[in-house]
Image (tube, rainbow, N blue to C red):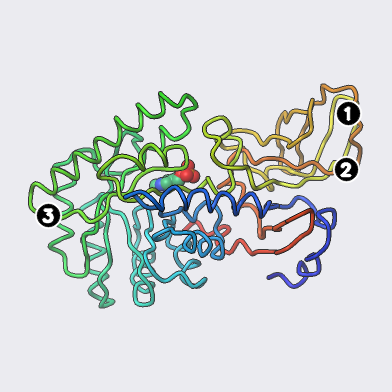
């Protein structure tokens, strides 16, 4: 808790200075319950991605609602999770490279369970050596490229070679495979999204079968994101879904799926109304990202975001009846929630119009 912000608790939304990240607690809680309920009755389980919210208390809430573990993107995020009391079943859903990070990972494993993904034989050797130095055994997932063409090995044969190397390395324990159909999760048309995800995840399933035919057990296969949780989550042979954005939602997911309620907004103040057709607010690029798409005003008809500059948001006003003036507030749905959250120090959690909590975004800026 930030002591200077604690005074806001119990006060109306209007007391929050801007720009600020505001959680609609009721909507967020609904999203947590909805996702938890979905996985409660299925063989696949939820491993929510920490990179979206970067706040340990929210990871605890997801775990309390049935999630089996947590995924995160970086070693520093894992450090924040562990410091925040999440000690079991953390998976860094990426490769950990460089001596400093590998040592940090091993140090963490003396206090908690933090697993990692690999796609390179030299990296496996370095991880094994460091694990032995630290006297730990760490869980390892082999990443398979399912068509996103980011990280991951391209063939089942290459996966098996790495799986064998991991299995034969003291200090490493082969756990399973990870694939991420990130190029499919935001396909708006449901039938097309289903077809693409099923086709791409087939590569992961075939890799699992290939490895198991060699006599090595694959304990877990992880994949999926918010846009495919109920597609990939239904495919036999997929054990865990690593959805993140479902918690808050954003413009990039609008129209993709209606199962979750947008629960996060960037609150902003009009700093200038230079013309009838132009409004300028204090939500610039330092308060909202534009890497995927622009933010959208919530419930302000006839007003469109034109662009964001360093400190300013430019709005075009089509509605002649719009009387917004300097000092008025506008809430925006973030364009891309994960990169927007990373710009803020804290969340203001609001219920029935009153500030209920102020939560530190403890892993904000933790990109190592
Ligand atoms: C490996 C991996 N899994 C899962 C996700 C979660 O995606 P989403 O936020 O769409 O749920 C991401 C997002 O980038 C990812 O990189």
* Mark 1 → mark 3, Cα distance in angstroms: 65 Å
* Residue located 56% across and 30% down the image: 255
Q: State yes or no: discs 3 and 2 in contact (Cβ < 8 Å).
A: no
Q: Which of marks 1 and 2 is nearer the N terminus?
A: 1
Return the residue at label 1. 322
Image quadrant where one finds the N terminus: bottom right
Query: Who is closer to the viewer here, 31 or 174?
Result: 31
Asked whether mark 1 and ligand 1 are closer than 8 Å, the reply comes as: no
Asked whether mark 3 and ligand 1 are closer than 8 Å, the reply comes as: no
The answer to whether 286 appears left or right of 84 in the picture is right
* Mark 1 → mark 2, Cα distance in angstroms: 12 Å
The answer to whether 277 appears left or right of 218 in the picture is right
Q: What element carries label 2?
A: loop
Image quadrant of ligand 1 equals top left
Q: Earlier in the sequence, mark 3 or mark 2?
A: 3
Q: How crowded is mark 2: few (under 14 residues within 10 Å), some or many (20 or more)?
A: some
* Residue located 40% across and 24% down the image: 192
Q: Residues within 10 Å of mark 1 (few under 14, many from 20)?
A: some
Q: State yes or no: discs 1 and 3 in contact (Cβ < 8 Å).
A: no
Return the residue at label 3. 216
* Mark 3 → mark 2, Cα distance in angstroms: 62 Å
Residue 185 x/y as whole percent: 44, 35
């Amino acid at each position: 808790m930030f002591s200077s912000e604690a005074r806001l608790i119990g006060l109306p939304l209007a007391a929050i200075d801007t720009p600020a990240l505001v959680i609609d607690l009721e909507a967020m809680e609904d999203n947590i319950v909805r996702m938890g309920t979905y996985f409660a009755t299925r063989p696949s389980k939820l491993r929510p991605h920490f990179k979206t919210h970067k706040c340990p208390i929210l990871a605890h809430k997801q775990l309390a609602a049935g999630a089996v573990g947590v995924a995160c993107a970086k070693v520093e995020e894992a450090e924040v999770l562990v410091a925040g009391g999440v000690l079991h079943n953390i998976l860094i859903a990426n490769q950990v490279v460089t001596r400093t990070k590998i040592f940090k990972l091993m140090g963490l494993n003396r206090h908690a369970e933090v697993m990692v993904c690999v796609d390179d034989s030299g990296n496996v050797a370095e991880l094994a050596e460091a694990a032995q130095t630290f006297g730990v055994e760490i869980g390892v997932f082999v990443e398979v490229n399912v068509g996103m063409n980011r990280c991951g090995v391209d063939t089942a044969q290459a996966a098996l070679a790495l799986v064998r190397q991991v299995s034969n390395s003291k200090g490493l324990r082969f756990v399973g495979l990870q694939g991420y159909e990130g190029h499919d999760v935001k396909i708006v048309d449901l039938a097309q999204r289903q077809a693409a995800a099923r086709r791409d995840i087939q590569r992961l399933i075939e890799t699992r079968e290939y490895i198991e035919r060699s006599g090595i057990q694959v304990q877990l296969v992880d994949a999926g994101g918010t846009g495919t949780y109920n597609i990939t989550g239904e495919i036999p042979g997929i054990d865990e879904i690593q959805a993140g954005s479902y918690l808050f939602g954003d413009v990039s997911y609008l129209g993709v799926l209606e199962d979750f309620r947008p629960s996060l907004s960037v609150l902003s103040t009009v700093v200038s109304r230079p013309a009838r057709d132009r409004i300028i607010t204090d939500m610039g690029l330092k308060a909202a990202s534009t890497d995927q798409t622009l933010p959208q005003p919530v419930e302000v008809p006839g007003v469109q975001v034109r662009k964001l500059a360093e400190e300013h948001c430019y709005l075009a006003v089509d509605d002649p009846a719009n009387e917004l003036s300097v000092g008025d507030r506008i809430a925006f749905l973030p364009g891309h929630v994960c990169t927007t959250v990373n710009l803020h120090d804290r969340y203001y959690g609001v219920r029935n119009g009153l500030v209920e909590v102020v939560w530190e975004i403890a892993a904000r800026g933790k990109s190592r």
